[in-house]
């Protein structure tokens, strides 16, 4: 059984019972039930969903409250909690709210209440009787008007008047007990007057789309193994991300063993770990596609297959490599978030972490856009993790989801102007105890104009750097200004920076000038102009990783597009880059060429297989 929760923002939309259920006793001139124009309910914005098939309900409730407090840390807005009526959920919500000192308004989902009314209706009406619908509508309207006790009394009176014996009035008794037991959470009159929602359709909608997407993958089976670790998107998370202890295990083989195998247990010939290790080594040797990975595996000698953990079969102990179809099927099914976390680096203790997104252009289909992947990269091109950004959303929705599993205390997080959001800055400083350096462009016009108007000519804290290379000469100047007390409307901002870049093309003589503004919570004592310039330039490290994936691994040209294939292949490419950097290769192309000279030993040695 999965426990799911959702948090969203909504503007109040007051309504009445007529907006929910039409009066069945009101007739128009033609003798039909009148249907006046109904007012719309509150619209959900900035939806965030979570859930688990392995975590307890208390843990899911705590996660929901964490997200709500992230959005409203001062508890200034009314918190409306919609539940399905389960007593243990209500008790958990009340306990969590009391612990956090926040007042919540708990409302039982109207749809669940209607289910009990229908059970009572079939005790009094024959199956298919149209009068049952009018009977339910009349009592539901009384409930919407706040008449809980009145409805319960009317149900008991109807059972007595009909002379129903004990067995036949079971549905009515259940409905009466439900209404009287949940009376304090059935104040729909107050909810409608206040403009609050009274149903949890957002949860049902999320489940419907999640199951549809899951079953849309050929060969997929819905079960605990497929859902228990699926941090695949920033919208719907039936999730169990790898813990810090699991990510910190020494050895790639041991870390990959944490992943759940999404395949059915029957008829498995190759273990999940052996197939993933095969794919890792093949990509290190230069493979760019499922077919190339399968060809590498097919030509691998027995000793290499043994090191990869391929099972020996038969009396002679023959090891048969996984086929291209097996590799393709597994990489389209395995959890992309879990794989990225387990093959990534631990950012704890690092100085800098860059966040940026990239589209795998070749994964675009007629029915959907290309997969857009949001990545986090450390200095030296070492990837921490990545997440696929859900279609029809932006990278902004995945920022906190990408970084939340990691310890970022003391780490400076840099990102482009798309992520210059107050919520992101507040979350980094308060929740993760990290620092930020964010670029400000014209997508934040008020903030950008404020930075431009600062007295930069009077600033004495400056740093100049000059360098030549790649056919150009570049001069960079960095000016920093402490803005504490200047009324800059951004959480925890301490310094602003003005970075001016002057490029000269040595061949054509063309000159390019660019001015960029940035803000940070680092004080002048913690970050000098030189340090700010280095951090701003370090953001380009993630662009270098994306460039290598495009040029050396041909990511944009790759036509892999099914299931989680684009995200998982991008993870394998990033893992190859990280591994080659750790081995001392400044040129990834040269490192791959060297690995290709001994393709069945060098890649295995690089990832530390015994």
Image: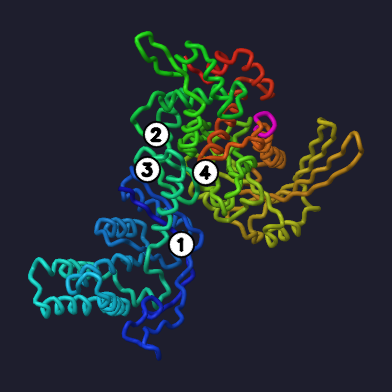
Compared to residue 271, the image places residue 605 above or below, namely above
Give the residue at mark 1: 74
Quadrant in which residue 243 is drawn:
top left
Above or below, 578 against 67 in this view is above
**Would you say residue 526 is visible in this rendering?**
no
Q: Is residue 409 left or right of residue 194?
A: right
Q: Secondary structure at mark 2?
A: loop
Contact between marks 4 and 1 (CB within 8 A): the answer is no
Q: List the residue tagged with mark 3.
A: 222
Q: Earlier in the sequence, mark 3 or mark 2?
A: 3
- Dominant SS type (magenta): helix
Observer-side mark, 4 or 3, equals: 3
Label 2 vs label 4, nearer the camera: 2
Q: In the rendered structure, which segment of residues is drawn in magenta?
A: 549-553
- Point out residue 408 in the picture as x, y percentages from the top left corner: 52, 40
Identify the residue position indicated by label 2 in the image: 263
Of the residues under marks 2 and 4, which one precedes in the sequence? Answer: 2
Sequence-wise, the earlier of marks 2 and 1 is 1
Q: Position of residue 163 (x, y in %)?
A: 8, 77
Sequence order check: which comes first, mark 4 or mark 3?
3
What residue is shown at x 54% (from left), y 49% (from top)? 390
> Which is more toward the observer, 517 or 486?
517
Q: Mark 4 = which residue?
A: 402
In this rendering, the answer to whether 377 lies above or below 294 is below
């Amino acid at each position: 059984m999965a426990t799911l929760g959702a948090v969203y923002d909504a503007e109040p939309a007051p309504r009445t019972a007529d907006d929910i259920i039409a009066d069945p006793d009101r007739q128009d001139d033609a003798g039909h039930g009148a249907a006046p124009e109904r007012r719309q309910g509150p619209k959900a914005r900035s939806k965030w969903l979570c859930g688990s098939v392995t975590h307890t309900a208390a843990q899911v409730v705590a996660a929901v409250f964490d997200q709500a407090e992230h959005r409203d840390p001062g508890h200034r807005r009314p918190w409306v909690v919609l539940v399905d009526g389960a007593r243990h959920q209500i008790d958990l919500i009340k306990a969590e709210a009391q612990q956090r000192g926040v007042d919540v308004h708990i409302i039982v989902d109207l749809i669940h209440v209607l289910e009990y009314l229908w059970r009572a209706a079939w005790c009094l009406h024959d199956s298919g009787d149209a009068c049952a619908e009018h009977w339910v509508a009349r009592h539901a309207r009384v409930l919407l008007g706040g008449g809980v006790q009145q409805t319960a009394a009317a149900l008991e009176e109807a059972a007595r008047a009909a002379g129903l014996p004990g067995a036949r009035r079971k549905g009515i008794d259940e409905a009466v007990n439900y209404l009287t037991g949940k009376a304090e959470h059935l104040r729909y009159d107050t909810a409608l007057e206040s403009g609050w929602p009274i149903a949890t359709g957002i949860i049902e909608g999320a489940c419907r789309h999640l199951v549809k997407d899951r079953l849309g993958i050929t060969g997929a089976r819905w079960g605990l193994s497929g859902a228990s670790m699926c941090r695949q998107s920033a919208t719907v998370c039936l999730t169990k991300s790898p813990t810090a202890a699991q990510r910190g295990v020494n050895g790639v083989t041991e870390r990959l063993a944490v992943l759940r195998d999404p395949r059915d247990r029957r008829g498995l010939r190759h273990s999940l770990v052996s197939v993933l290790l095969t794919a890792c080594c093949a990509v290190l040797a230069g493979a760019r596609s499922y077919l190339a990975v399968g060809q590498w595996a097919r030509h691998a000698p027995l000793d290499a297959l043994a090191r990869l953990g391929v099972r020996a079969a038969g009396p002679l102990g023959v090891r048969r490599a996984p086929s291209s179809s097996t590799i393709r099927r597994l990489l389209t099914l395995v959890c992309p978030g879990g794989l990225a976390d387990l093959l990534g680096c631990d950012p704890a203790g690092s100085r800098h972490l860059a966040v940026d997104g990239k589209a795998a252009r070749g994964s675009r289909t007629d029915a959907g856009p290309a997969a857009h992947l949001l990545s986090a990269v450390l200095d030296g091109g070492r990837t921490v993790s990545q997440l696929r950004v859900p279609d029809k959303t932006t990278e902004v929705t995945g920022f906190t989801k990408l970084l939340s599993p990691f310890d970022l205390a003391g780490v400076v997080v840099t990102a482009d102007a798309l992520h210059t959001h107050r919520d992101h800055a507040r979350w980094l400083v308060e929740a993760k105890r990290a620092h930020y350096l964010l670029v400000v462009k014209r997508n934040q016009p008020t903030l950008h104009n404020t930075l431009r108007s600062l007295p930069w000519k009077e600033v004495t804290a400056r740093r100049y750097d000059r360098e030549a290379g790649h056919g150009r000469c570049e001069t960079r100047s960095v000016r920093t200004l402490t803005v504490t007390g200047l009324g800059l409307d951004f959480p925890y901002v301490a310094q602003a920076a003005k970075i001016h870049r002057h490029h000269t093309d040595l061949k054509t003589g063309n000159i390019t000038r660019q001015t960029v503004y940035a803000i940070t919570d680092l004080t002048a004592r913690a970050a000098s102009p030189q340090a700010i310039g280095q951090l701003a330039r370090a953001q380009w490290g993630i662009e270098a990783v994306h460039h290598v994936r495009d040029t050396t691994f041909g990511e944009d040209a790759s036509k892999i597009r099914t299931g989680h294939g684009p995200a998982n292949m991008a993870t394998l490419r990033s893992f190859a880059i990280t591994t080659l950097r750790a081995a001392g290769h400044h040129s990834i192309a040269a490192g791959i060429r060297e690995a290709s000279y001994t393709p069945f030993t060098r890649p295995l040695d690089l990832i530390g297989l015994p």
